[in-house]
Image (cartoon, rainbow, N blue to C red):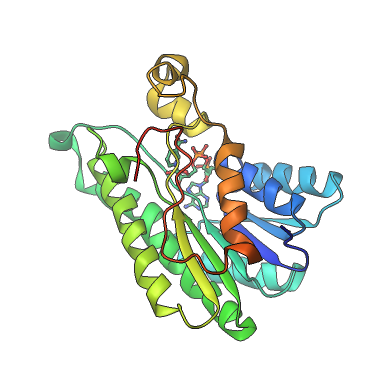
Amino acid sequence: MSLDGKVAVVTGGGRGIGQAIAVVLAQHGAAVAVWDLDLPGAEATATAIRDAGGRAVAVGGDAADAVQVRAAVERTHTELGPVTVLVNNAGINETVRFTDLSEEAWDRLIRINLKGPFLVTQALVPDMLEAGWGRIVNISSSSAQTGSPKMAHYVASKGGVIGLTKALAMEYVAKGITVNHVPPGFIDTPLTRQTLGDVQAVAAMMPMKRAGTPEDVAHAVAFLASEEAGYVTGQTLSPNGGRYLV
Ligand code: NAP
């Protein structure tokens, strides 16, 4: 499996799952633009890739803001060239009872988790159409497969990401562009620690008796980004340790 000569964008690549995805895509040969709100985080990921002999650039900004997305695309084009691999990974989560969920919290989460992938994908699809080749991998969530209490806005946003995946898979099915989604199960990341606290207690309830690692997710993404996955589109590849069986 090789991504030599490909340019990839990974949103939210400054830490957690996105960081592992950026590193693993670079290990397969891609030049990676690491986009993140947290520029120092993005720089740390890009530096780790370069120190290992790869090519990477860090780009700061909000992946759910149209003006900042345009600037990030421009910077990526200047530094690395046209993009044919996109991983929509940036996302947030919080737990809140449905009756306490405010309109502001709903709008904020839907903006980042669902509008973000719309804006970034729309900005980068022209590169893929021009190349006649593209790979879009959206990070959804197993919670959109199983449902989950106190996460109505999050689960709704990830259900939207799954719908977006299927719609675009069909829109570009004859253009050399595949669109798939990866719903992680319970993965040990900074977001998980912020949202759930005691990772070990929850991990003990998982079928494999452990939390997933960001790398468990990254390897699934790398497969979907590869040449070898060219006949796979509109699909679900679930690194979830047996938490949910499709
Ligand atoms: P994380 O540790 O919080 O990392 C997410 C990164 O994305 C952070 O660096 C964050 O920056 C950045 N980010 C957030 N909003 C952004 C925006 N609008 N524009 C650009 N960057 C932004 O999260 P994670 O656990 O790795 O999760 C990554 C993805 O996997 C998310 O979509 C999440 O919903 C999904 N997921 C995670 C799990 C899990 O168990 N961890 C399970 C299912 C799905 P800041 O730190 O500055 O906010």
Q: Position of residue 153 (x, y in %)?
A: 26, 45
Q: Is residue 166 left or right of residue 48?
A: left
Residue at image location 42% in from the left, 36% down from the top: 185
Residue at image location 40% in from the left, 79% down from the top: 171
Establish if 130 lies above or below 1: below
Q: Position of residue 149 (x, y in %)?
A: 22, 32
Outermost residue to the left:
99
Establish if 188 lies above or below 230: above
Of residues 157 and 241, the one drawn nearer to the viewer in this rendering: 241
Q: Is residue 163 left or right of residue 133?
A: left
| Residue 102, picture quadrant | top left
Q: Is residue 131 left or right of residue 185?
A: right
Asked if one can make out residue 43 in the rendered structure from this viewpoint, the answer is yes
Of residues 28 and 125, the one drawn nearer to the viewer in this rendering: 28
Q: Is residue 137 left or right of residue 38?
A: left
Q: Position of residue 116 (x, y in %)?
A: 43, 60
Outermost residue to the bottom:
130
Residue at image location 67% in from the left, 43% down from the top: 40
Q: In the rendered image, which quarter contains the N terminus?
A: bottom right
Residue at image location 57% in from the left, 52% down from the top: 221
Q: Position of residue 41 (x, y in %)?
A: 65, 42
| Residue 216, picture quadrant | top right
Asked if one can make out residue 36 in the rendered structure from this viewpoint, the answer is no
